Image (cartoon, helix red, strand yellow):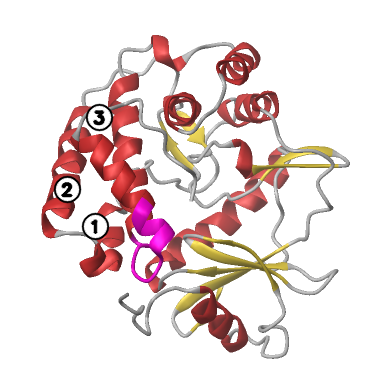
Amino acid sequence: MTEPSPAAFTEARARDLLAAAGHPEAAADAALLSLGENAVFALGDQGPVVRVGRSAELLERAERELGVARWLAAEGVPAVRAAEPVATLADGHPVTYWQRLPEAVRPAGPDDLAALLKLVHALPEPPFALPRRELLGGVERWLRLAGDAVSASDAEYLRGRRDAFAAAATALEPHLPRGPIHGDALARNIHVGPDGPVLVDLETFSSDLREHDLVVMALSRDRYGLTADAYDTFVSVYGWDVRDWEGCAVLRGSRETASCAWVSQHAPGNPAAHKEFRRRIASLRDKDATVRWYPF
């Protein structure tokens, strides 16, 4: 098995960065909450949550995420709040601090997600610029991080899908008015505490087609095992089914392409990620929309 390179964003590397950010004593024992685009750690029992970005390229996004948190607080939207107002750097990686949320009282459901999306989709533009939802913008970076774990032919196939769907998206006519969106509207990005559900993971907030947020759940139904009843609940609370929109297939295909490429960055040194990448890329090449994908 090929060992990960020293620059690979492993849990060990993330803990080294946490130490470099000024937490050498906590780095070894801090609870790792998630490892994706960021490594998310909880400092102690009462301390803040620390997000360490996978690469220096994510600094601008981390700073914007802090601005989004302040804006949502001013608008009264239930969302995670920043514990520190600015991002810092640890060996070039952005580091941000967030208020600790109370223990969840139950898992978030599709109705919670739909209700919060309705709040977000009713917002006007913020007093700062939000980017477009560049769903496919990370594909090249993820493939670069994947290195030799992804074959040249698979990488070129994903680049071709990226380019085709990006071109198709420019011609879409939305059903809903454009405006602020969450950008990664999954139930796992909702935390239900004693005071009710709040939005978390604000890094993909954008200003774009509201349909981006709704396609996520449609794809969850098709690929990730979301039940038909759960999807119907989501649609009922939100008030519209994005699958009735003729542009749904374009955004769905874009998200599948991005999700496949996203997993690839974890493949070096991680057999589970490599297996999931192989599952996803094979189903795309075979045009088999029935193959179940698994969250990673």
Quick one: label 1 or label 3, which is nearer the N terminus? 1
- Residue type highlighted by circle 3: Ala
State left or right for residue 54 relative to residue 109. Answer: left
Q: Is residue 252 above or below residue 82?
A: above
Quick one: label 1 or label 2, which is nearer the N terminus? 1
Q: Is residue 34 above or below residue 188?
A: below
Viewer-proximal residue among 292 and 210:
292
- Across and down, in percent, residue 170 comes to 22, 30
- Across and down, in percent, residue 48 comes to 75, 68
Viewer-proximal residue among 132 and 12:
12
- Across and down, in percent, residue 127 comes to 54, 45
Task: Give the residue number, with chain letter if any, for mark 3.
Answer: 169
Mark 1 and 3 residues: CB-CB less than 8 Å, in contact? no
State left or right for residue 98 relative to residue 254. Answer: right
Task: Give the residue number, with chain letter if any, for mark 1.
Answer: 140
Q: Which residues are magenta?
A: 265-275
- Picture quarter containing residue 230? top right
Q: Is residue 94 above or below residue 17?
A: above
Q: How far apart, in angstroms, are the residues tagged by discs 1 and 3?
A: 18 Å
Say which mark, if any, is on residue 187. none
Say which mark, if any, is on residue 159. 2
- Residue type highlighted by circle 2: Arg
Q: Nearer the viewer, mark 1 or mark 3?
A: 1
Residue 86 can be seen, yes or no: no
- Residue type highlighted by circle 1: Glu
State left or right for residue 191 relative to residue 227. Answer: right
Which residue: 62% across, 11% down? 236
Q: How far apart, in angstroms, are the residues tagged by discs 1 and 2?
A: 8 Å
Secondary structure found at label 1: helix
